[in-house]
Image (cartoon, rainbow, N blue to C red):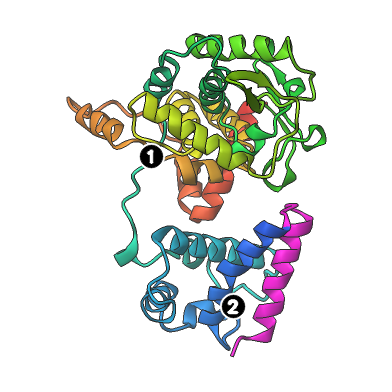
């Protein structure tokens, strides 16, 4: 039987996410679907005594995956269940310090998915070389749909936008001279959780030229309120652009058109979201300072750099191989270390170190 206090506390957490983090109903529903497993695991035990519960949370999830859920848990789902548990317990400890004083931060930080079901973290993303190959596909001047699709591939990579936002992006929200995109729900852009942000394009000249050509073309024919990825209408073999708003199945239509573009370029198909991964990996691999890292995180519209780090920090396996191969020669001379600062940092939990990293990054940006 689920502990009533645990249930009420998790419902309070969901209310916090709705009001303070401004998550939408769909996101709240996902958090609840992940969080209910923590409630079932704790059973009658208060969350403040969670470390006393047997079996351990990872063992419980392994058993639920194999028995209770009929083997339906994917590794990614298990990861999200554990991430939700960590975030909730961290919130609970911060907001109810007296009640949760006996639950160590270190215990919360060490929550992990079952090791036996963890999938190799191969990071799949669209590379700059692949985008260039997509733009190199010969396209007739009167094939407006194909020209639009090539511009879409470039825009998704340079901007790192989610496909729902890109598919609802009006021409008026795009300012290529300043490489600026207004991802504003007030303009009709469908962003995740209704967030509003002004974001920026990577400055890669050969790719900028592709979207500049398409941008000039649609602006000369359509009003600012029309979609940048505009519908194409075919009549008696002739194509024309439409000023109609984005339809409900816009994401699926974009994915279908990009699949065709990949096939024409004779490349393995990747989903539209993999362009966002490609944008992030390209930018993070070129970040030189924490200020750069923070800027990439903000451009992805993440709440903080912990989200960026958790999703995109793993590098492509080829780069890891190259970096490890480069670790040769004699040891480098270490920089002087402040002993007091070093001792202080060693005393922090993983969660506190992450918070310190965020504060340092924000200071560097100032």
Q: Which residues are magenta?
A: 1-24
Q: Residue furthest front?
A: 236
Whether residue 22 appears in magenta in the rendering, the answer is yes
Mark 1 neighbour class, 10 Å CA radius: few under 14, some 14 to 19, many 20 or more: some
Q: Secondary structure at mark 1?
A: loop
Checking the image for residue 124, the label placed there is 1
Answer above or below: position of 351 versus 103: above
Mark 2 neighbour class, 10 Å CA radius: few under 14, some 14 to 19, many 20 or more: many
Q: Quadrant of the C terminus?
A: top right
What x and y, as percent, mark residue 320?
A: 28, 35
Q: Is residue 187 left or right of residue 91?
A: right
Task: Give whichever of 358, 332 is nearer the camera.
Answer: 358
Residue at the image point whose x is 61% and y is 72% from the top: 101
Answer above or below: position of 69 versus 193: below
What x and y, as percent, mark residue 192?
A: 67, 45
Can you identify the residue that label 2 sits on? 47
Q: Which quarter of the picture shows residue 186?
A: top right
Q: Which quarter of the picture shows residue 180?
A: top right
What x and y, as percent, mark residue 59?
A: 38, 76
Residue at the image point whose x is 59% and y is 34% from the top: 361
């Amino acid at each position: 039987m689920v502990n009533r206090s645990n249930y009420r506390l998790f419902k309070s957490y969901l209310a916090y996410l709705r009001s303070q983090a401004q998550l939408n109903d769909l996101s709240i529903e996902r958090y609840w679907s992940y969080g209910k497993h923590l409630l079932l695991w704790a059973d009658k035990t208060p969350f403040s005594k969670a470390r006393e519960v047997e079996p351990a949370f990872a063992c419980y999830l392994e058993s639920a995956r194999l028995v209770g859920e009929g083997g339906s848990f994917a590794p990614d789902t298990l990861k999200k269940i554990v991430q939700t548990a960590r975030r909730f317990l961290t919130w609970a400890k911060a907001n109810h310090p007296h009640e949760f004083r006996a639950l160590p931060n270190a215990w919360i930080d060490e929550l992990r998915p079952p090791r036996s079901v963890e999938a190799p973290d191969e990071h799949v993303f669209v590379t700059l070389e692949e985008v260039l190959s997509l733009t190199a596909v010969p396209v007739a001047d009167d094939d407006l749909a194909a020209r639009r699709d090539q511009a879409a591939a470039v825009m998704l990579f340079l901007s790192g936008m989610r496909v729902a936002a890109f598919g609802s992006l009006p021409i008026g929200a795009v300012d290529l001279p300043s490489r600026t995109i207004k991802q504003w729900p007030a303009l009709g852009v469908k962003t995740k959780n209704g967030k509003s942000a002004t974001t920026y394009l990577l400055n890669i000249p050969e790719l900028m030229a592709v979207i500049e050509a398409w941008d000039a073309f649609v602006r000369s024919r359509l009003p600012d309120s029309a979609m940048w990825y505009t519908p194409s209408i075919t009549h008696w073999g002739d194509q024309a652009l439409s000023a109609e708003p984005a339809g409900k199945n816009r994401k699926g239509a974009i994915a279908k058109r990009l699949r065709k573009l990949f096939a024409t370029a004779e490349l393995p198909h990747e989903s539209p979201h993999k362009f966002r991964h490609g944008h992030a990996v390209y930018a993070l691999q070129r970040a030189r300072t924490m200020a750069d890292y923070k800027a990439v995180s903000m451009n992805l519209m993440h709440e903080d750099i912990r989200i960026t780090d958790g999703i995109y920090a793993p590098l492509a396996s080829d780069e890891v191989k190259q970096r490890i191969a480069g670790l040769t020669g004699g040891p480098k001379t270490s920089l002087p270390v402040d002993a007091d600062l070093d001792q202080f940092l060693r005393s922090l939990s993983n969660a506190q170190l992450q918070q310190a990293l965020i504060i340092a990054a924000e200071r560097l940006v100032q």
